Image: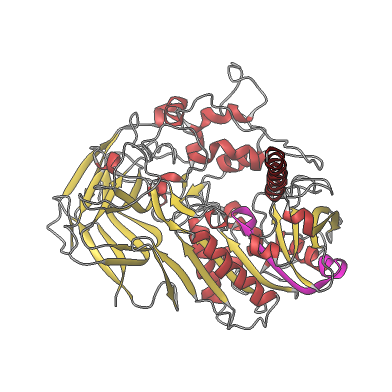
Amino acid sequence: MKICTLKTLVVFLAILIVSCNIKIEEQETNYAQENYNKTETTITMRDGVKLFTTIYAPKDTSKKYPILLQRTPYSVRPYGADTYRNNIGPNRHLMEEGNIIVYQDVRGRWMSEGAFDNMRAYIPNKKTIQDIDESSDTFDTIDWLVKNVENNNGNVGTWGISYPGFYATCSTIDAHPALKAASPQASIADFFFDDFHHNGAYLLSYFKITPLFGTPKDKPTDTSWYKMPDIKTQDQYQFFLDAGPLSNLNSYFQNKKLDDPSLQVDEKTDDFFWEELKEHPNYDEVWQRKGILQHLKNIKSHVATMVVGGEFDAEDLYGAIETYKTIEEYNKDNYNTFVFGPWSHGQWASTQAENSVGNYYFGDSISLKYQEQIETKFFNHFLKGSGDKNSGLPEAYVYDTGKKQWESYTTWPPKNAEKETLFLSEDQKLSAIEEKETGIQFISNIKKPVPYSEDIKSVFTPRKYMTDDQRFAARRSDVLTYTTTILTEDLTLSGDILAKLQVATTGTDADWIVKVIDIHPADSEENNKNIQDHLKMSNYHLMVRSEVMRGKFRNSFTHPEPFIPNKKTAVTIKLQDVNHTFKKGHKLQIQVQSTWFPLIDLNPQTYVDNIFKATEEDFKTQTHTVFTSSKIEFSVLKN
């Protein structure tokens, strides 16, 4: 009996060990490596420059596959024919069902030859082989792929998130005949309104990643050649406050010691993108040429587009919305669809089930369902299916971030969205009736700017703040608040929001920031899994949308002009689209302020031609006035 028991135990342990090994193997299995062959090659562009390209082709060669192409400035790593990415393609479904997945280092980046140009300008009328842009590089790449990669079915799709999204957009212009589907996702559209600027205000939060785009490279490399600035603190608010004018940051982009007494604030730095930023503070020809929207007026009709964006994308919210709208306006016969979900930047590519942005929880499996039911369906229809306009997808699939549910629309913005106006009243209420004009004043102290978040941290391209609780700001004397009474029925905002301010300042310049807030009921017990310990959903001030306007650009981004001190002046701010229901029992609040630090740089509050060259003496505390003739124009969804 004991022997039998011992044998049984041995067998049991053997089975356990084998079982554990199987589980370990399952966890360590790289699906791409087991099911794909990886090839590294270079593809020669029309001007002779070679671009490094990685091709993952299914080992099963019994059928033909579409090609899915992503062009990126962020590296096709890992390098080496025997080293594989854990996941390839837009999502796991497209990887597992079989597609030829291709990644390419764009011109001048990583292992590719040539010179990098940050958002290289499109050339409309190319006359020689030297007239290259990202559209021509994509064309040449696709042409080579369909002619040289075995077992491809002749159909190509492009996709990318953020900067790769810009390259996906470029692929649709002068598109190769084999390109059948493109999905620009969180795509950059214009650097004066995306990422590094918002309506002329410099996004100081991007300072730390400037070398990523502006450090020169003279030869192909598989290792990083740039170095991020080390600010040596986790308190970025205090760091930038102590640093003072932007010109004092030049030293972080120079090969000199920070305490070098010979360093001049106007000296040229070693970072070509920093130089571009500081030498072109206005929306001049440099930024205008780099913008892609003006070139989306004649997209080839054989290219279907699916534009994807996050409703809480702190980086490229403008790009996604304006890319979709521009394609839609000028290409009436094209297939063009829009997906707008409760995500931060690129969050729809996440494999996590839980969907939260910062403190705010929206639900589970939102990204996973998008990948399976929207993204995969789009590419399969146009690359493997009939490719007609009956894709089974709606024109616009937009999440209601208040009701926490998806909505399908035949147009975006919805046709039944009507304009309604609320005025900023003297008693800090939002009123449907314009009162006799008076003004509310506040002091904008440049020594104590309003923070964009109450968190103490040092991050670049912050994301969490987009859904942060705004009570910390509402309780400051330099933030004006205007609030509705408790809503007696649901109020759904669908589309853009215009803040039409009437303001004055004792200075000659000022920034104007407007935030739209959803105030939750005091007795709210809403479930938010990741809320910070010091917060409760009771009276939570959810930031639904926000935007800044650098005052000197109020009439023109190309030709700035100062304010006349103490003169009432119109400043209009377009806040990007929302789809949010302020539920019965909630309140809608508008916050108005003039600093948002260090998300954006400090406005000197005295007019300067170039803020990157402002001096300490230019910065002055000023008193600002917001008049009761100021109003907010909403797009309200009607049943």
Residue 50 among those drawn in magenta: no
Residue name at image x 28 percent, y 49 percent:
591
Residue 520: horizontal and vertical position, in percent?
Answer: 25, 53
Residue 123 in sight: no
Residue 418 in sight: yes
Q: Which residues are magenta?
A: 144-166
Residue 159 among those drawn in magenta: yes
Question: Compared to 277, does 246 lie above or below?
Answer: above
Q: Nearer the viewer, residue 131 or 145?
A: 145
Q: Is residue 366 left or right of residue 14?
A: left
Residue 430: horizontal and vertical position, in percent?
Answer: 19, 57
Residue name at image x 34 percent, y 47 percent:
512
Residue 412: horizontal and vertical position, in percent?
Answer: 44, 72
The image quadrant that residue 162 belongs to is bottom right
The image quadrant that residue 381 belongs to is bottom right
Tally of marks: 0
The image quadrant that residue 606 belongs to is top left
Q: Is residue 374 left or right of residue 157?
A: left
Q: Nearer the viewer, residue 271 or 28?
A: 28
Quarter of the image that includes the N terminus: top right
Q: Is residue 90 left or right of residue 457?
A: right
